[in-house]
Image (spheres, grey):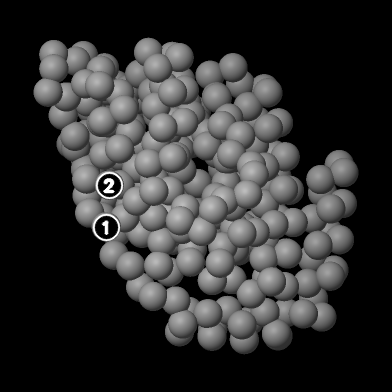
Amino acid sequence: MLNWLKYILELLLLIPLFPFLVYEGKELRKRIKKMPPRSEFLHLPSEKSATKNLLIIGESTAAGVGASAKETTLAAKTASFLYGKFHVYNLGKNGLTASRLPRLLAHGKPDIPNHFEVAVLMIGGNDCFKFYPPWKFRLEIEKMCKLLTKKKQVKHIILPMIPPVQQFPAIPKIMRFFLGWHRRILIHEMRKLAGAHPEIDLIELNGNYAAEFFAEDGIHPSDFGYEKMATEIARRIHVHA
């Protein structure tokens, strides 16, 4: 209930600023350097006789936007830190929101396996930018998790925390303030979801991020950022492997 009240208060404060934020958003899109996705659809087979499958699916961080090459994306780095224990499948789409995850799973790459031991959901950044209602956000992720466990026999779901939108260097301060506010609201819903479902492992990634964590566009992770993220994700996967 308290989270709902925070969301309503946020919207009330946003109303008088809405024209300004729309203008800033349009100007921001003109200024930001466009960076290509490097890993929308990847299959990284294990060089060893691995029998386990890992699925990474989600927004631009799964799509590898900001990485300099396929080899430095989140999927590739995670695969390298798993030391051949998994065949890694990656589905990513820039601009994706939580509500579009099932569609990406169904249509992104039809020849992926029907069984995964572990899945990683990279989601939430675009839901922050759209100020998506927190209860709907939780329901969308919960729906995706149920889909993964039923359709893909996923045993463990790794849910990294929403990207640090409140620290994106390219975003004006007033926008970062509200994005950070909404991020905290959505993260509260993620914690509630993880607390109710033991198969979901929420990775807490709060803190201040150094400048080198971000790519040239000031929004997406750099090669260094992806390596840091992959290190923590791989560490959690090893716990469940």
Q: Is residue 22 at all visible to an observer of this figure?
A: yes
Q: Residue at x 65, y 59 (%)?
A: 166
Give coordinates of residue 118: x percent, y percent: 38, 23
Give coordinates of residue 204: x percent, y percent: 61, 34
Please, what is the three-letter code of the amino acid marked with disc 2? Thr
- Dividing the picture into quadrants, the one containing residue 22 is bottom right
Q: Is residue 61 at all visible to an observer of this figure?
A: no
Locate the C terminus by quadrant: top left
* Residue 72, numbered label: 2
Decide: few, some or many residues near mark 1? Use Cα within 10 Å; few <14, some 14-19, many ≥20: some
The relative height of residue 46 versus residue 13 in the rendered view (above or below) is above
> Seen in the image, is 19 located left or right of residue 238?
right
The relative height of residue 15 versus residue 66 in the rendered view (above or below) is below
Decide: few, some or many residues near mark 2? Use Cα within 10 Å; few <14, some 14-19, many ≥20: many
Badge 1 is on which residue?
Answer: 68
Please, what is the three-letter code of the amino acid marked with disc 1? Ser
Locate the N terminus by quadrant: top right
Give coordinates of residue 105: x percent, y percent: 34, 41
Q: Nearer the viewer, residue 230 or 101?
A: 230
